[in-house]
Image (cartoon, rainbow, N blue to C red):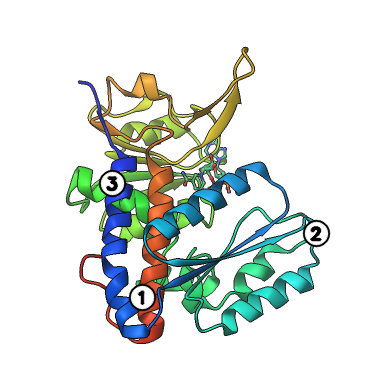
Amino acid sequence: MTAAIIDGKARAARLVQEVAAAVPAFAAARGRAPGLAVVLVGDNPASHVYVRNKLARTAEAGMRSIEHRLPADTREADLLALVAALNADDAVDGILVQLPLPGHVDADKVLVAVDPAKDVDGFHAVNAGRLATGLPGLVPCTPSGCLILLKETVGDLSGAEALVVGRSNIVGKPMAALLTAASATVTLAHSRTRDLAGHVARADVVVAAVGVPELIRGSWLKPGAVVIDVGMNRLVGADGKGRLVGDVAFAEALPVARAITPVPGGVGPMTIACLLRNTLLAAHARAGLPPPVAL
Ligand code: NDP
């Protein structure tokens, strides 16, 4: 068996088109395009790349972006004041505060300062609670993207043994909640898990969100498993060149799995596409409009 490669880049491009197709109707109803405010504090090079990509896709979808780049020594109070101003601005439908924030800023305090109705990252405790209790709300982008890829690869997840490795608030926990809502039987593993390989061996679906390069070996996988690799680990080779690898040993997994996402080109593009989808959904909800049918 050679695993099918799940083309997240192509699926994300389709999702961006679906979002773009729904923008004109919103603009006609409201007299403006949906607006996404992106706040970037400091000089983290990876964050700059992410923000650049997010802004480019936002423009591609015909939405308006409002960019706020702040110096690394920005005071927490000033950042909170900016978030409050964005909350109050009716033309802003989504607010994204790019993480990580500098160490002197309490990220949790900033994230809960965002109006939950504009929380397009889905990180606010209100939205996390809504997801956990099965109420509609804004769902974190990376697990949303993983679920789209999984549903299209597996079909019905009902009864599937699903293993999520990693329990962060932004990926692992919401992923486990989404899989539970899809009626999978979910195991959530983390750094204290005993016998990770044994859990992997039982899983029909593995979602790896750890941040440890190639932690999950191909020989651990159940033959025919579907693997979603969220990990993005930058390694520097002997030649000094950087390369991205996932949390799963991709070459080892290929002959065992039924399908697998590549790194890069798997989950990453879906994350950005789901951010645009969340912005459009937030815009509709705030305007009292029903969500666009295609989304
Ligand atoms: P965090 O560092 O917040 O969480 C990592 C999780 O992995 C923790 O729950 C930790 O356990 C667990 N863990 C660490 N080591 C092990 C181990 N040896 N065995 C089992 N579990 C372990 O990371 P994130 O969730 O933010 O990100 C995870 C990865 O996904 C990173 O590589 C990140 O770059 C990538 N990412 C990719 C995105 C994309 O769009 N493609 C978006 C977001 C993240 P414990 O809780 O016990 O410490």
Query: What mark, if any, has residue 104 been given in the picture?
Result: 2
Query: What mark, if any, has residue 98 been given in the picture?
Result: none
Of the two numbered discs 1 and 3 on the same chain, state the one appearing first in sequence: 3
Q: Amino acid at mark 2?
A: His
Q: For this rendering, which residue is in front, 104 or 272?
A: 272
Give coordinates of residue 60: x percent, y percent: 39, 56
Q: Amino acid at mark 1?
A: Leu
Query: What mark, if any, has residue 135 been given in the picture?
Result: 1
Give coordinates of residue 139: x percent, y percent: 41, 64
| Disc 3 target residue | 11
At mark 3, the secondary structure is: helix
For the point 26% across and 64% down, which residue is it?
A: 21
Please state, as top left, top right, bottom left or bottom right, where the N terminus lies in the image: top left
At mark 1, the secondary structure is: loop
Q: Quadrant of residue 216?
A: top left
The answer to whether 133 is drawn above or below residue 5 in the figure is below
Q: Is residue 90 left or right of residue 294?
A: right
**Label 2: few (<14), some (14–19) or many (≥20) C-alpha neighbours in 10 Å:** few
Q: Amino acid at mark 3?
A: Arg
